Image (cartoon, grey):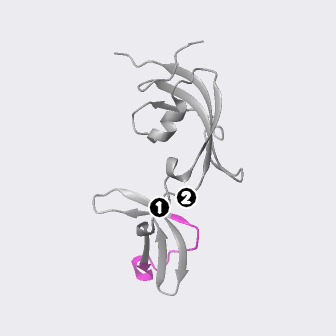
Amino acid sequence: MSDAVIGSHSEVLMHFDLKLEDGSAADSTRVNKKPAKLVMGDGSLTANFEDCLLGLKQGDKKSFTLAPEDAFGHSNPDNIHHMDRNRFSSDMEISEGMIMGFGQPDGQEIPGIIRSVAGDSVTVDFNHPLAGQTVIFDVEILEVNEPSA
């Protein structure tokens, strides 16, 4: 068992569960029994999530509660767009709550949540699905390695 402590560039293998305040699961590595592997500082986690991990070591289990501003941010009204129904394929079934990909001019695709369909207007929310939510971040550190020089 390694006694390495998670630092700003450590390689970390961990299980995590992301839950909402009501206890409902938002994401979990345990579902597929595939732990997450990341390098601290590589951008796969926000700075606030990384700060939770600093100082932990192999075998540690910890739970953190993050307010919206420390997790996925607050919902931004500028990220909610009203689109004409004719911008969607006519044979496409569109319903409230569905998530779909929208192509960007640079070729990237970003997810949008259909918030409402009223006549010829479709309201699409491009905020992160967990924006505005307080989340509970449960981690179990499986392995900590220092990066090879």
Image point (57%, 49%), residue name: 67
Front residue (pair 126, 93): 126
- Residue 42, label in figure: none
Question: Pointer 2: what residue?
Answer: 132
Amino acid type, mark 2: Gly
Residue 127, how many percent across, how many down? Answer: 47, 61
CA neighbours of label 1 inside 10 A, class few (<14), some (14 to 19), many (20+): many
Residue 121, how many percent across, how many down? Answer: 47, 83
- Seen in the image, is 147 located left or right of residue 132? left
Main secondary structure type of the part rendered in magenta: loop
Image point (39%, 34%), residue name: 42
- Seen in the image, is 42 located left or right of residue 132? left
Question: Pointer 1: what residue?
Answer: 127
Establish if 51 lies above or below 99. above
Q: Quadrant of residue 15?
A: top right
- The C terminus is located in which quarter? top left
Establish if 115 lies above or below 119. above
Farthest bottom residue in view: 119
Label 1 vs label 2: CA separation? Answer: 9 Å
